[in-house]
Image (cartoon, rainbow, N blue to C red):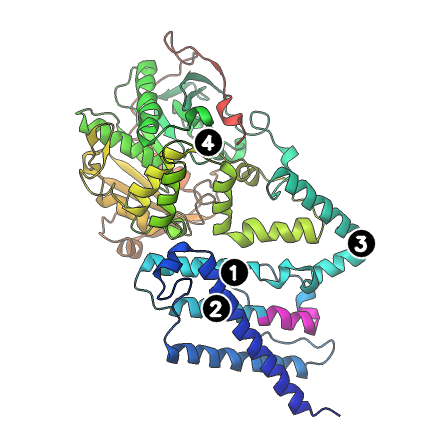
C-alpha cells in the first residue's frame, strides 16, 4: 500500500515542478512577445530575473500556500463547503458560477490558478528594471499570459462547459463550433448581436444634416430641439481612431442629443474611415482638414467669430493642436474649450504607452509611415487586449465553449465597428506624442509650419477625466491644467474611458468629483474634491451655459447658401466599414 506521506510529498514535488515549468514558460512568453524586452535583457531573448533572495522568498511563499491548498482539499469532505484560501480580484466574475465551488476538484483548480496568477504578478513586480515604461510592459505581458492560461478558457477545466454540454445533450458544443466558424469567417470575435443595430436606423439618430465634406471628414450640423438656442455654437471633434456615434448611440444615452436639448447649436466632425485614397495623409492633414476647416464653416454658417469647441480622446489632442496652430498664426479662434479624457502630456500614457517603444514605432515608420493603412481590425485587437478578460476571453468561453449568442448591446456594436488609420498620421502621432512626448514642450513641434505652444491656448477650459481610465490615466489628464494658458475647471468622473464619459444624465448613475482647487498635483486636487452623485453631463451643461452667449431664436434652416445640406445625418462616412 502506498504511504500517504509519500503520496503527499510526490504531489508537492509535482506542484513545485509545475510552478517552475510555468515560470519558465512565462519568461519565454514574455521574451517572445516583446522585442524591446529582448533588447533590454542581459542576454538576447532573456528577461532579467528578480534578485536571488527575493525570488527565493516568493517561491517559498508560493510553495507554502500551494501546500496549504492541497492539504485543505485532501481534508475536505464530499458536499462540505469550504472557505477559499484566495479570492479573485475585485470585478473578476470568471469563477462566480456555483460549479466552481461545489466540486472540490474545480475549487482546487480555480484556487491553484489564482495562486499561480498572484505569484506571477509578484515576480513581474520584482523584476529589476529601472525603465518604468519597460516594467509596465513586463506587467502588461504578464497579465496577457495570466488571462490566457485561465482554466475558464479550456473545455477540460471548465465545469460550466461540461454542465452546459450535458444539459443540452451536446447541442452547445455543436453551436459553439458553428459560432467559431462564423467568427473565423468574419475575422473577429462576436461581442454582440451584429444584426440588432444599424447606424442611421437605431444608432446615431439625432436629426441633422451633413453641410460640408472633404477627403477626411464630413461636418454635421444638428437640428435644434428647442425654440431658442445659445448664440455661441459648439463644434465637437471626436476621436478619429473610432467612429463618432459613441457620442450618439440611442436617444436615451446620446451625449450629442443631450447637448442639443440644452439649447446649443451643435456641429460635429465625422471622420472618414480611411481608404487607400487617404493612405498618404499625415497629422497636418488632419488638423487642416479637420478642426481648422470645420471652424471656418461654423463661423460662416453662424456668423459667430469664436465658437466653443469640445474634443474627445485623441480628438481632443487634434483639436488642441489645431488651436495652438491658429494661435501661433495670431488668430483668436474659439471662446472656450472642453476636453474629455484627453492626453496632451504623454509622460504616463496608460497601458497603450507601455506597448509603444522605439522598435515598434520605427517598424511602423518603415512600413506604413510613408504611405499605407493600419487596418481597423488590428487597432481593435490592440484595444481589446488591454481588457482581455472582458473583451476577448469572456466571448471565447460564452460563444465557443457554451454555445451562447451574445446579447444586443449598442456600445459593444460600436466597439466592433473599427476604423482604418493612414500610416503617416499614425507614425507621426506615435513618435511625437507617445514616444517623445513633445507636444507639452513649447516650440518643439512644428505643425502646418507653426511651432506650437499650448500655453497660447488661453481660453476657459473644462477638463474631464475618468477615475478608472486605462487609456488616459486621470492623473495625466490633470497635467493639461499646467499646459494650457487659460483658467480651467477639472472634473473627475467615475468608471472608465468610455463608460465614465458616456454616462447619460437620463439615468443619473455613478458620480463625479469637483473642486475649486488649482492644486499642482492631481493627488492634492483629489484631497480637496467633493463627490457628487449622478452624471457629470449636468455639471458641464451649467458650465457651458454661462459661456455660450444670449438666447436667440433657433434657425429652422441648416447650413447656408454657401454650405447647403448634402445628406441627412449621420452621413455616409460613418457607415463605411473597415
> Could you tell me how far apart the alpha carbons at marks 4 and 2 are, in whole angstroms?
39 Å
For the residues bearing labels 3 and 2, Cβ distance under 8 angstroms: no
Write down the region rendered in magenta. Answer: 101-112
> Could you tell me how far apart the alpha carbons at marks 3 and 2 are, in whole angstroms?
36 Å
Q: In the figure, residue 124 lies in which quadrant?
A: bottom left
Residue hosting label 1: 145
Q: Can you give x and y, in whole percent of width and height, for residue 530 in the image?
A: 34, 52
Residue hosting label 3: 170
Residue 515 visible in the snapshot: no
Name the residue at 52% across, 80% down: 63
> Could you tell me how far apart the alpha carbons at marks 3 and 1 are, in whole angstroms?
30 Å
- The mark that comes first in sequence, 2 or 1, is 2
SS for callout 2: helix
For the residues bearing labels 2 and 1, Cβ distance under 8 angstroms: yes
Q: Foreground mark, 1 or 4? A: 1
Q: Can you give x and y, in whole percent of width and height, for residue 8 in the image?
A: 64, 86
Is 118 left, or right, of 192 in this rendering? left
Residue hosting label 2: 120
Name the residue at 56% across, 58% down: 148
> Local crowd at mark 2 within 10 Å, few (<14), some, or many (≥20)?
many
Residue 30, above or below 553: below
Amino acid at each position: 500500500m502506498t504511504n500517504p506521506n509519500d503520496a503527499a510529498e510526490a504531489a508537492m514535488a509535482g506542484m513545485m515542478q509545475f510552478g517552475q515549468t510555468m515560470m519558465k514558460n512565462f519568461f519565454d512568453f514574455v521574451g517572445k512577445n516583446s522585442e524591446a524586452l529582448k533588447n533590454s535583457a542581459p542576454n538576447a531573448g532573456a528577461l532579467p530575473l528578480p534578485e536571488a533572495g527575493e525570488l527565493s522568498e516568493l517561491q517559498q511563499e508560493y510553495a507554502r500556500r500551494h501546500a496549504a491548498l492541497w492539504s485543505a482539499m485532501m481534508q475536505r469532505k464530499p458536499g462540505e463547503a469550504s472557505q477559499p484560501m484566495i479570492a479573485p480580484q475585485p470585478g473578476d466574475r470568471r469563477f462566480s458560477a456555483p460549479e466552481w465551488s461545489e466540486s472540490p476538484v474545480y475549487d482546487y483548480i480555480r484556487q491553484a490558478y489564482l495562486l499561480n496568477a498572484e505569484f506571477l504578478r509578484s515576480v513581474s513586480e520584482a523584476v529589476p528594471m529601472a525603465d518604468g515604461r519597460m516594467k509596465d510592459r513586463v506587467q502588461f505581458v504578464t497579465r496577457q499570459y495570466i488571462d490566457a492560461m485561465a482554466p475558464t478558457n479550456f473545455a477540460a477545466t471548465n465545469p460550466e462547459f461540461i454542465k452546459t454540454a450535458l444539459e443540452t445533450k451536446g447541442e452547445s458544443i455543436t453551436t459553439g463550433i458553428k459560432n467559431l466558424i462564423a467568427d473565423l469567417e468574419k475575422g473577429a470575435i462576436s461581442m454582440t448581436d451584429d444584426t440588432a443595430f444599424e447606424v442611421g436606423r437605431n444608432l446615431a439618430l439625432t436629426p441633422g444634416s451633413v453641410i460640408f465634406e472633404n477627403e477626411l471628414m464630413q461636418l454635421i450640423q444638428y437640428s435644434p430641439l428647442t425654440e431658442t438656442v445659445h448664440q455661441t455654437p459648439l463644434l465637437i471633434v471626436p476621436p478619429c481612431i473610432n467612429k463618432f456615434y459613441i457620442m450618439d448611440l440611442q436617444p436615451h444615452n446620446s451625449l450629442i442629443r443631450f447637448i442639443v436639448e440644452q439649447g446649443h447649436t451643435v456641429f460635429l466632425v465625422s471622420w472618414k474611415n480611411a481608404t487607400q485614397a487617404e493612405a498618404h495623409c499625415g497629422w497636418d492633414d488632419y488638423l487642416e482638414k479637420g478642426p481648422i476647416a470645420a471652424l471656418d464653416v461654423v463661423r460662416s454658417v453662424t456668423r459667430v467669430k469664436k465658437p466653443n469647441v469640445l474634443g474627445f480622446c485623441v480628438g481632443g489632442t487634434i483639436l488642441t493642436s489645431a488651436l495652438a496652430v491658429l494661435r501661433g498664426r495670431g488668430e483668436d479662434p474659439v471662446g472656450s474649450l472642453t476636453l474629455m479624457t484627453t492626453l496632451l502630456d504623454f509622460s504616463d500614457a496608460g497601458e497603450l504607452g507601455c506597448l509603444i517603444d522605439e522598435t515598434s514605432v520605427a517598424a511602423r515608420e518603415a512600413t506604413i509611415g510613408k504611405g499605407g493603412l493600419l487596418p481597423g481590425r488590428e487597432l481593435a485587437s490592440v484595444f481589446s487586449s488591454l481588457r482581455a478578460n472582458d473583451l476577448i476571453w469572456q466571448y471565447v468561453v460564452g460563444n465557443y465553449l457554451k454555445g451562447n449568442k451574445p446579447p444586443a448591446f449598442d456600445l459593444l456594436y460600436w466597439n466592433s465597428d473599427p476604423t482604418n488609420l493612414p500610416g503617416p498620421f499614425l507614425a507621426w502621432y506615435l513618435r511625437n506624442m507617445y514616444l517623445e512626448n513633445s507636444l507639452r514642450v513649447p516650440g518643439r513641434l512644428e505643425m502646418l509650419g507653426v511651432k506650437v505652444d499650448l500655453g497660447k491656448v488661453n481660453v476657459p477650459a473644462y477638463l474631464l477625466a475618468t477615475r478608472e481610465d486605462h487609456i488616459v490615466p486621470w492623473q495625466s489628464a490633470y497635467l493639461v491644467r499646467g499646459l494650457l494658458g487659460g483658467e480651467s475647471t477639472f472634473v473627475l468622473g467615475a468608471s472608465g474611458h468610455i463608460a465614465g464619459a458616456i454616462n447619460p444624465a437620463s439615468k443619473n448613475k455613478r458620480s463625479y468629483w469637483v473642486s475649486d482647487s488649482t492644486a499642482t498635483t492631481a493627488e492634492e486636487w483629489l484631497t480637496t474634491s467633493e463627490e457628487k452623485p449622478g452624471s457629470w453631463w449636468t455639471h458641464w451643461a451649467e458650465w457651458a451655459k454661462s459661456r455660450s452667449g444670449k438666447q436667440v431664436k433657433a434657425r429652422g434652416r441648416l447650413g447656408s447658401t454657401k454650405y447647403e445640406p448634402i445628406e441627412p445625418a449621420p452621413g455616409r462616412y460613418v457607415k463605411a466599414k473597415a
